[in-house]
Amino acid sequence: MKKSEFLEALEDILQREEPCQENDILADYDEWDSLSKMAIMAYYDKNFKVKLSLNDFKSMNMVSDLIKLAGENISD
């Protein structure tokens, strides 16, 4: 998956009107809440076969952290 495709998917998951950028701070998003984290957990499990827990989100501050977490599944 390309990075641009992931950012579009993230916008859909978070139901954002504005585009997501790699250097955005997740806490600045009004949509960043426990429900969106659960949706991201399901998305990573389905698309990347990566199992996340709510504790994993404690170390995530930026959209780039979500990209890094997907590892080789997201390319430039």
Image (cartoon, grey):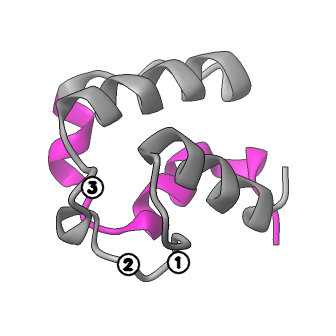
Q: Secondary structure at mark 3?
A: loop
- What is the three-letter code of the residue carrying label 2? Asp
Residue at coordinates 21% horizontally, 26% vertically from top-left?
Answer: 54
Residue at the spot of label 2: 24
- What is the three-letter code of the residue carrying label 1? Gln
Residue at coordinates 26% horizontally, 36% vertically from top-left?
Answer: 56
Which is nearer the eye, 4 or 68? 4
**Residue 12 appears at what percent x and percent y?**
58, 45
Which is nearer the eye, 11 or 2? 11
Mark before the other along the chain sequence, 3 or 2 = 2
Tell whether label 2 touches label 3 (CB within 8 Å).
no
In this rendering, is residue 56 above or below 9? above
- Horizontal side, residue 49 vs residue 26: left or right: right
Tell whether label 2 touches label 1 (CB within 8 Å).
yes
What is the crowding at mark 3: few (fewer than 14 residues within 10 Å), some, or many (at least 20)? some
Residue at the spot of label 1: 21
Mark before the other along the chain sequence, 3 or 1 = 1
Residue at the spot of label 3: 60
- What is the three-letter code of the residue carrying label 3? Met
Q: Which residues are magenta?
A: 55-76
Image quarter in which the C terminus is found:
bottom right
Which of the 4 quarters of the picture holds residue 8?
Answer: bottom right
The span from disc 3 to disc 1 (Cα, nearest Å) is: 15 Å
Q: Nearer the viewer, mark 3 or mark 1?
A: 1
Q: Secondary structure at mark 2?
A: loop
Which is nearer the eye, 23 or 65? 23
